[in-house]
Each structure stands twice: as structure tokens, then as C-alpha cells.
Image: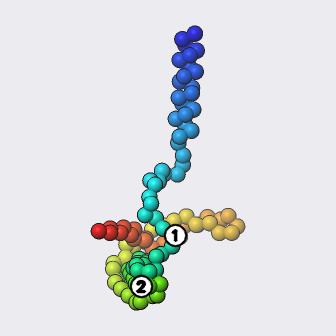
Amino acid sequence: MNKKLYLSGAIICCMVALGSCSDEPSQPNNEDITDAIDKTGSIETVLSTNHINKTHDEVVTTHKIWTNSNLYKTVVHRDTIPSLGQTTEQGENENGDTTSIKLQKDYEIYVTVQ
């Protein structure tokens, strides 16, 4: 009797543990994420990178300043930075054929707001 009860309990625990697993990383409940910009008084910032050539990339920082629901000013900063080089990836065409292709490596962008 004890062995059956122990085995049943172990199976239930395994099922609960497996049910709590998911392929997607858990995301914290972040109340600061927004889908719309409050244009009564805010600064909207967009960061992007562009590949200029094999040795140089460009960082573009665009600030849109909103006051009283009107776009007051747009400020754009462009900086040239060294390229990270190339990497090789496997690509597939519409026929299902795979081939190696060279791509420029991309920078990761991290933003710290104080």
C-alpha cells in the first residue's frame, strides 16, 4: 500500500513539475511597458544600427520631443563605429536548398535610464 501511494505521489509531482515548464522564458509583470506614447509631454527615442561597409557601422539615435500633442522637435545623432565583422549562417531558398551565406554581425543594444 505504501509503495503504491508513494509511486502515485511521485508521478503526480512529476506531472505538476513538467506542466510548469514552457519553451518560452518567463517574463516578469512589467507595468512600465506601453503601446502608445503620451504626446502631451514626452520624449520618444529610437535607436538603430546600419551597416555602412565591411569595416564600419552607423548608430542612429532619434529623439522626438512631444509637447501638448504636437511634435516640437526631432533630433537625430549619427555616429560611425567599427564593424563587428562577418559571420556565416545557413540559408535556405524557396526550393529547400541550403547554402552558407556571409552576414554582417549586429550590435546588441542595451539602454539604461536613470
8 relative to 30 in the view: left or right: right
Q: Earlier in the sequence, mark 2 or mark 1?
A: 1
* Residue assigned mark 1: 35
Looking at the rendered image, the disc whose residue lies closer to the viewer, 2 or 1, is 2
Q: Position of residue 37 (x, y in %)?
A: 47, 75
Q: Quadrant of the C terminus?
A: bottom left
SS at circle 1: loop
Looking at the picture, which amino acid does disc 2 mark?
Thr
Badge 1: few (under 14), some or many (20 or more) residues near its Cα, within 10 Å? few
Q: Quadrant of residue 67?
A: bottom left
Q: Position of residue 49 (x, y in %)?
A: 42, 78
- Tell me: residue 74, above or below residue 109: below
Residue in the image at 40% along x and 80% along y: 41
Cα separation, mark 2 vs mark 1, equals: 18 Å
* Residue assigned mark 2: 67
Residue in the image at 53% along x and 42% along y: 21
94 relative to 61 in the view: left or right: right
Q: Quadrant of residue 109?
A: bottom left
SS at circle 2: strand
Q: Which is nearer the eye, 29 or 86?
A: 29
Q: Which is nearer the eye, 62 or 114?
A: 114
Residue in the image at 40% along x and 89% along y: 73
Image disc number at residue 97: none
Q: Position of residue 38 (x, y in %)?
A: 46, 76
Q: Residue placed farthest to the top in the image?
A: 1
Decide if residue 90 is in sight here: yes
Whether residues under marks 2 and 1 lie with C-beta atoms below 8 angstroms apart, the answer is no
Looking at the picture, which amino acid does disc 1 mark?
Asp
Residue in the image at 51% along x and 65% along y: 89
